[in-house]
Amino acid sequence: MKEKVADLIKKSLDSKVKLSKEEISKLIEIPPSIEMGDFSFPCFILARELKKSPKDIALELKEKIKKLPKEIATVEAVNGYLNFYLNRVILAESLIKEILSKKTKFGSVNLGNKKTTLI
């Protein structure tokens, strides 16, 4: 999901801004409260470069984002942050499908497979 949010932000940024998708992804935060969204992008880092207030930048980015992917329900601009809210129904459906397809393998990883672990 974070990659989709980073894609939306990258596409809506002014061409003068030299942030890569990876740099944008690193800046995306998880807000302290669910009322503030599922992901949040602070626009403060862009203020100096664009010579605008973070609040104005967040509003402009929100206006430039026209079409949201089905996984993202809404986007809000609040006090210099661009807040993204996920579509919980779509997220739950995809998670259930993944659980049903992987069955007992769901959640397992090969991290550290065939290596010695010291506890």
Image (tube, rainbow, N blue to C red):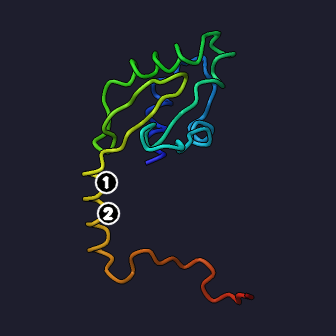
Q: Is residue 51 left or right of residue 55?
A: right
For mark 2, give the secondary structure: helix
User: Which numbered tag is attached to residue 91?
Assistant: 1
Mark 1: few, some, or many residues within 10 Å (few <14, many ≥20)? some
Residue at the (33%, 33%) spot, across then down: 74
For mark 1, give the secondary structure: helix
Residue at the (47%, 78%) spot, across then down: 108
- Residue 99 in picture, x, y percent from top left: 31, 72
Q: Is residue 10 left or right of residue 91?
A: right
Mark 1 touches mark 2? (CB < 8 Å): yes
Q: Amino acid at mark 1?
A: Leu
Residue at the (60%, 10%) spot, across then down: 52
Residue sitting at the far top = 51
Residue at the (62%, 42%) spot, across then down: 26
Q: Amino acid at mark 2?
A: Leu
Residue 90 vertical position relative to residue 69 in the rendered view, above or below: below
Mark 2: few, some, or many residues within 10 Å (few <14, many ≥20)? few
Quadrant for the C terminus, please: bottom right
- Residue 4 in picture, x, y percent from top left: 43, 42
- Residue 61 in picture, x, y percent from top left: 46, 21
User: Which numbered tag is attached to residue 95?
Assistant: 2
- Residue 50 in picture, x, y percent from top left: 62, 13
User: Which numbered tag is attached to residue 14?
Assistant: none
Residue 101 figure quarter:
bottom left
